[in-house]
Image (cartoon, rainbow, N blue to C red):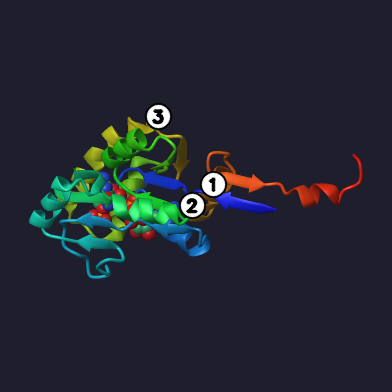
Amino acid sequence: MRETKKGMLLVISGPSGTGKGTLVDRLLKEDPSFVFSVSCTTRAPRSNEIPDVHYHFITEDAFEKKVQEDAFLEHATVHDHRYGTLRSEVYEKMDQGLNVVLDIDPQGARHVMEREPSCVSVFVLPPSYEELYRRLHTRNTEKEEEIAKRMRNARGEIAQKHLYQYLLVNDTVEASMEILRAITRAEKQRAIRYFPEISEEEETNHVDC
Ligand code: ADP
Ligand code: 5GP
């Protein structure tokens, strides 16, 4: 049997610190059909980040130029920095039959859901606000003021969860990965992106039934 596949666009969104990056990293490690869409950002790289692997780190001017050129599928200002998903990252990979995963904030996710209605959208929730606060602290990448801003934003973002196809409460990473595997497994079989061709030959190999 021959089969053709069209890439899936998987949008993972949710409040900062809820565990999106952790789940996306795990998905990329265990499922080679997925590739990451490397976003552009105007924020400075963190010590553990590799340019063009985690982000394309660019200046405000370079970002604005890309906006003018319509290079972004979506872009947003998140916690005072600009972030954008490049069309080239998404469509070139999907055209190769790869599944593309976006780890983007809820403003950007809303734009992608409007522009690409066939995308698969997953909103990641924390088990509680207390746990979200704890995770933002233990990650140790933001100062207290930044954490407070993320906690304030989280409430408004969570209020928009009904816009997504799937909701995932990220209690343990293992349990969340089980859910994510189930979602991606089922979504790969959708008739909009999976085209099995049943050959005549296979049919004649069988006796009457
Ligand atoms: P996001 O990408 O949504 O901002 P991260 O993936 O950076 O969030 O996770 C924030 C922090 O929470 C990190 O320190 C990460 O190791 C931790 N974390 C992620 N998922 C879980 C989980 N299920 N249980 C406990 N800690 C988690
Ligand atoms: P961080 O700076 O911690 O890596 O990311 C901050 C937030 O920006 C996260 O919620 C992340 O999902 C989001 N983000 C990363 N890339 C993009 C993007 O291309 N577009 C949008 N809208 N958000 C992004």
| Residue at image coords 33%, 36% | 115
For label 1, count other residues whose C-alpha is less than 10 Å away and answer few (under 14), some (14-19) or many (20+): some
Which residue occupies the foreground of this view, 16 or 41? 41
Residue holding disc 2: 172
User: Alpha-carbon distance for marks 3 and 1?
Assistant: 18 Å
Q: List x then y, in percent, for residue 156.
A: 27, 33
Q: Which of label 2 and label 3 is nearer to you? A: 3
Residue holding disc 3: 162
Q: What SS does tag 3 mark?
A: helix
Label 2 CB, ligand 1: below 8 Å? yes
Q: Which mark is first along the chain, 1 or 3?
A: 3
In the picture, measured across the screen, residue 29 lies left or right of residue 45, that is right
Mark 2: amino acid: Thr
User: Alpha-carbon distance for marks 1 and 2?
Assistant: 11 Å
Which residue occupies the foreground of this view, 202 or 12? 202
Residue holding disc 1: 179
Q: Is residue 135 visible?
A: no
Q: Which mark is first along the chain, 3 or 2?
A: 3
In the picture, measured across the screen, residue 184 lies left or right of residue 3, that is left
Q: What SS does tag 2 mark?
A: loop
Task: Tell which residue pokes out farthest to the left in this image.
Answer: 61
| Residue at image coords 51%, 58% | 33
Mark 3: amino acid: His
Q: Are marks 3 and 1 in contact (CB under 8 Å)?
A: no
